[in-house]
Amino acid sequence: MSIPKFGLNFVINKNFNEKFLLLCGFEKFKEYFVRIDILEKLFVTIIEKTEGKTFKILPEMMNLLGCTKEDFYQLMDLMNYKKSKNSDAYYFSGDNKKNKVKVITNKNKASPFSKLLALNIK
């Protein structure tokens, strides 16, 4: 197992143990790992620079992570930030997973669970 060099904020998983990196305070985004304290600073910078629900990518944001521009844009996409079509700005697209309520229906009226389902307890 190899250990990332001291001071790294951004790591692309090559030969690192994922559980070890998570234990050391990194957050995982597919093959990218970012230190949690640096993510917090990035989010604060994004919030400060957001106007009208959009923000522009600034060099200081990429400098926080210490990654390439291509990796930064990929990371933004993995964090649900999407590029605006009309300008060179980004916006948070939110979580696309809707919390759908699954309705369970039981066709078997003789089932002992049919009475429980009929109670409609939430």
Image: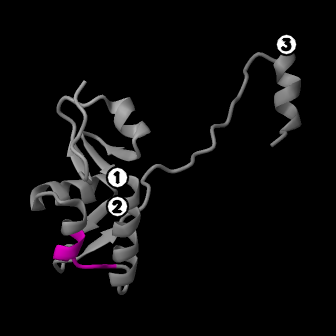
Is residue 58 or residue 9 the one in the foreground? Answer: 9
Name the magenta segment's main secondary structure: loop
Mark 3 lies on a secondary structure that is loop
Task: Decide whether residue 6 is among the magenta residues.
Answer: no
Q: Earlier in the sequence, mark 1 or mark 3?
A: 1
Measured as percent of width and height from the top left, residue 54 is found at 32, 79
Residue sitting at 85 percent across and 13 percent down?
A: 110
- Which span is picked out in magenta? 54-61
Residue 79 seen anywhere in this rendered image of the structure: yes
Tell me: 1 left or right of 19. Answer: left
Tell me: 113 left or right of 92. Answer: right
Q: Which mark is residue 70?
A: none
Task: Decide whether residue 59 is among the magenta residues.
Answer: yes
Q: Which residue is mark 3?
A: 110
Mark 1 lies on a secondary structure that is strand
**Where's the N terminus, which quadrant?**
top left
Within 10 Å of disc 1 (Cα), the crowding (few <14, some 14-19, many 20+) is many
Q: Which residue is mark 2?
A: 38
Q: Earlier in the sequence, mark 2 or mark 3?
A: 2
Measured as percent of width and height from the top left, residue 70 is found at 10, 57
Is residue 29 or residue 27 the one in the foreground? Answer: 27
Residue sitting at 67 percent across and 36 percent down?
A: 103
Measured as percent of width and height from the top left, residue 30 is found at 28, 40
Residue sitting at 22 percent across and 29 percent down?
A: 2
Q: Which mark is residue 35?
A: 1
Q: At label 3, which amino acid type do we have?
A: Ala
Q: At label 1, which amino acid type do we have?
A: Arg
Disc 1 to disc 2, how far (Cα)? Answer: 5 Å
Determine contact: label 1, label 2, CB under 8 Å: yes
Within 10 Å of disc 2 (Cα), the crowding (few <14, some 14-19, many 20+) is some
**Where's the C terminus, which quadrant?**
top right
